[in-house]
Image (cartoon, rainbow, N blue to C red):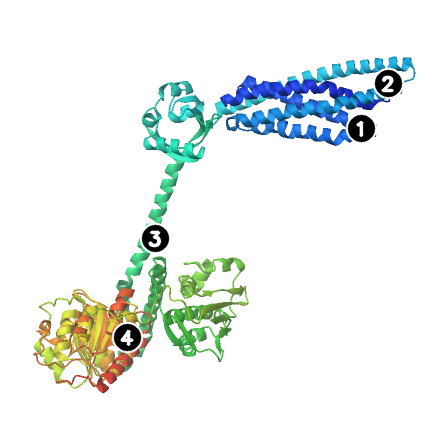
Amino acid sequence: MGYVLESSNLILDPYIDSYYMMAGVKKLPITIEKTTQINLLMAEMVSHSLITADEKAKLIILYSLIKSELEDIGRGLQISFRENPKIKDIKIETEVIIEETKKFFIGFIEREILDGDIGAIQAAEFRKIGKQAVGVQFRLYDILSPALDKLLETRIENLSYKKYQVQGFAVLVAIAVIYATIAFNRTLAQRYKAEEEMERAEQKYRSIFENAIDGIYQRTPDGQYISANPALARIYGYDSPEELMAQLTDVSRQLYVNPSRWEEFKTAIASKNAISGFESQIYRKDGSIIWISENARAVRDENGTILYHEGIVEDITDAKQAREELRLAKEAAEAANRAKSTFLANMSHELRTPLNAIIGYSEILQEDAADLGYEEIISDLEKIRVAGKHLLALINDILDISKIEAGRMELYYETFDVPGLIVEVSATVQPLVEKNNNTLEIRCHPNIGSLYADLTKVRQILFNLLSNAAKFTENGKITLEVTLEENASESKIIFSVSDTGIGMTPEQLEKIFQPFTQADASTTRKYGGTGLGLAISRHFCQMMGGDILVESQLGKGSTFPIRLPLLASESKAVKSKPPAASQSEEKPEWGKNTEPSASASANLKISHSPLVLVIDEDVSVLELLQRRLSKEGFRVAVATTGEEGLLLARKLHPDAIILDVLMQGLNGWAVLNALKTDPDLADIPAIVATILDDKNLGFAVGASDYIAKPIDSKRLLTVLRRYRLGGRILLVEDDISTREILRRMLEKEGWEVIEAENGQVALARIFGKDFSSHQKSQPALDFPDAIVLDLMMPEMDGFQVIAQLRNHPQTRAIPIIVVTAMDLTESDRQLLNGSVQQILQKGAMSREQLLSEVRELVFAAVQRNATSESAIPKN
C-alpha cells in the first residue's frame, strides 16, 4: 500500500522531517513486541520440530506485520533525511539496521520456516538470530529518539507565535489520529489477507495429500504409520488409510517380502538422512506381491534424534515387468541373431561344397565339349558356370556379413606389393568394365610400394568397388587411383575408385553402407545384387584401421576413397605366421578297414608318371580331381579317409598328396601332421584342398600348399607342377566332384595323382595296410612328391592326416597343399603352421586360379625336395 500521508494535504506544516521521524519512533516498540512474539512462537515449534496449522497462521500474520512496519519506517526515514540534510549523519546506520533485520530475520523466516524444513533448524541457531533482531531494533530506537528530540527543539524555537504552536500541535494530533486510523485499518487488512493466504495454502496442501497418485506417509523408526494418504492405502491393498495404520504394525514381516530390506532402509536413511529410488518387493493386504519405489527422508529433533520418516511410494510393478519383458525380448532377439549368424558362418563348408561340383563339372564339360566339337552346348555350359559363380558370390557375401555379425571374422596380415595387386585386380575386373562399354584408367603414384594388411580383404574391397562402378556406369570411365598420404604420425595409402555413372542422391548416400540395402528398390530390380558388398567392404576397412567414404552427385557419378594405414594394427588380426603347433599332441588311432586294394596300389606304382594321392571323403571331389589330374597326365591314388590316405602315402609314396582337412574320423589336419612327422613321408608335398579360408593354418601343420574349394584346376596343376620331379601327388579330398576336377587337372599336367577321399584312405595310400604300426622296418613305399589335402573329411580329416604325415620320418618333408572351404580359426592355423606349404580357399578364387595355385605349389615343393639333401629316394 502506498504511503498515503506523504502526499496528503492534511500535512500543513513544513516540518515533515520531524513528523516522519516521530512516526518511526512510535512504531518501533510495537515492532519489537511482535519480534519477541515470533521468537517465543518459534522456540516452541523448533523444540518439537513441528508446526501446526494454527502456529503457521500466527507466524504468517506476525511475519507480515513486522515486514510491513519495517518497510514503513524505512520509507518515513528516507523522507526525513531528504527534508532535513542536517540529520543525514545517522542515515547510513539506520538504513543498515533496517536492511539487516529484513535480510537476516525476515529472510530466515521465509527461507527456513515457511519454505523449508523446520525439523532441520537448530534451536540455538534460531535463538541467536531472534536475539540479534530484537537488539538491532532497540539500537535503532536509541538512535532515532535523540535525533527526534533535536528536531522538535528546533521546531519549537522556530515558532514565534503561540497560535502557530497550537496549530502545529493540532496538526500533529490530527496527523497522529489519521495515521493511527490508517495503520489500524492496514493492519487488519493485512491480517485478513494473511489468514486467507494461509487457508488457501492449507487447502492446497491437503488436496495434494488426499488426491496424490503416489502414496505419502509418515512412519516412526520402528515401522508404525503416523499418517498415510488414500493412494498409499490403495497401493498396499487397504480400504482406507485408517485401516492401513491400524493393521500394518510390523513392516519387516507384514510389508517387505525380504525382511532385510527394512533393515537396509533404516540403515540408509539413518546414514544419509534421505534415500531415493529404494526398490523393494512388498506384500499387499491380500498376499499378492508388487514392486514399489520409495523416496524418503528422516525428520529429526534438535538433538539429531530421528522422530519419524516421511516419504513417497510409487507402484512400479508394471514398469518393472515391462522392463523385464523388454530385456528378455532383447536378449532373445540378440540370441536369435547370433544363432543365425553363427549358423550361417558354420555353414560355409556345406554351402560351398555343392557349388564345387556345379562349377567344376561345368568347366570340365566345357573343355570336353570343345575337344569333341560340341560347340552348340558350350554356351549352355557357360551359363551354368556363370550361374554357379554368381551363386557362390552371393553365398560368400552372406557368409561374410554373418561372420562379421557373429564376431568370427578374422584378419590375416602379410606384406604384399600394391602395384602387383592393382595389375591383378584390374585384369580381373576388365571384362566387367568392357561389358557396359566402359574404359578403365589406372593411376598409381610412383612411390607406392608394399602394404602390410590382409591381402585377400583388400583385393575383395577393390573388386567390390570396381565391379559396382562397372555395373552402374554405361559408356563412361572408371578410374582407380592409388596415392600415398604421409605425415609425422601415420602414413596411409588411399585407393580411390571413381566412375561417371548414375550417381546417388543425399538420401541414398545415408543408407549406402547399410547391409542388404541398395539405393532404392529399382536398383535391385535392374542391377541385381544383395546390397552387402559395400557394408562388407567398410567392415573390412575398419577392421584394418581404415575406412571407406563416398562422394556422389546424381547423374554425374560417384567416388569411393579407401584409406588404409601402411602398417595396420594387428589387434584384431591373426598374424600371417602363427607359432608352430606343439608336436606333443596325441596321435590319432587308425582304423582297420582303410587299406587300398593291392591291384590299385600295384597299378599306381608301375607307372612312372607323377603320382598324386587325393584324400577326401567327398566322392565327387575325388572323381573330379581324378579326371582332371588324369587328363593332365598324372597318376592318381584316392583315399576317402585320413587313415586310408596315410596308408597309401606310406605304401605308394606319391609325388604329392591332396588332402581335405574336414573329414570324419582322422581329419586332414591329422593326416597332414602324420605326413610331416613321418621321416619317410615328410618330404611328400601335402596340398590341403578345403573350404576353410585359412592358408596360415594349413601351413601351421605342415601343408605344402593350400587350395580353396571349389578347386581351381589350373591353380592345382600349377601347384602340383612345383612338386613334379617325383611325378606323384596324393590328393586327399572327400568331395568327389572336387577330387575329380583336381585329378583331371593334375593328370593333364603330367602328374600321377593318388586319390584319397578322407584322411584314413590317404594314409593307407601312403603307408599300405600296416600304416598304423609305424614300423620303420617296413619296406619303403613310393611316397607322393606332394599332397593336396582337404581339411573337412569324414573318418579322418585333413588335420589328422597332416599330423600323421609330419610325425612319420618318411613323410615329414612331403609338401602338403591345403585346399579347403573350411573357415579356419586361429587355433586351426596354428595347428597347420609349419606342416603345410600353402592353404588354398575353395570358393575364394576361380577354378582356374585355384588349379593354377595347386599346380605351382606342387611344382615348387617338388623342386625344393629334389634339391634338398634330406630328400628320401623312391624305391
Give the alpha-carbon distance from disc 2 to disc 3, as whole Å: 103 Å
- Name the mark on residue 87: 1
Give how far across and how far down residue 168 sits, in percent: 86, 16
Rendered-image quadrant of the N terminus: top right
Give the alpha-carbon distance from disc 2 to disc 1, as whole Å: 17 Å
Mark 3: give few (<14), some (14-19) or many (20+) Cα within 10 Å.
some
- Name the mark on residue 349: none
Q: Is residue 100 left or right of residue 515?
A: right
**Mark 3 — residue?**
337
Q: Which image quadrant for residue 163?
A: top right
Residue toward you, 711 or 436: 711
Q: Mark 3 or mark 4: name the one nearer the start of the chain.
A: 3
User: Which element is circle 1 on?
Assistant: helix
Q: Mark 2 or mark 3: name the one nearer the start of the chain.
A: 2
**Mark 2 — residue?**
156
Mark 1: give few (<14), some (14-19) or many (20+) Cα within 10 Å.
some
Give the alpha-carbon distance from disc 4 to disc 1, as whole Å: 110 Å
Identify which amino acid the numbered label 4 is placed on.
Gln
Rendered-image quadrant of the C terminus: bottom left
**Mark 4 — residue?**
838
Mark 2: give few (<14), some (14-19) or many (20+) Cα within 10 Å.
few
Residue 184 can be seen in this image:
yes
Residue toward you, 551 or 767: 767
Q: Mark 3 or mark 1: name the one nearer the start of the chain.
A: 1
Identify which residue is drawn at 81% across, 24% down: 17
Give the alpha-carbon distance from disc 3 to disc 4, as whole Å: 34 Å
Q: Is residue 761 left or right of residue 709?
A: left
Identify which amino acid the numbered label 3 is placed on.
Asn
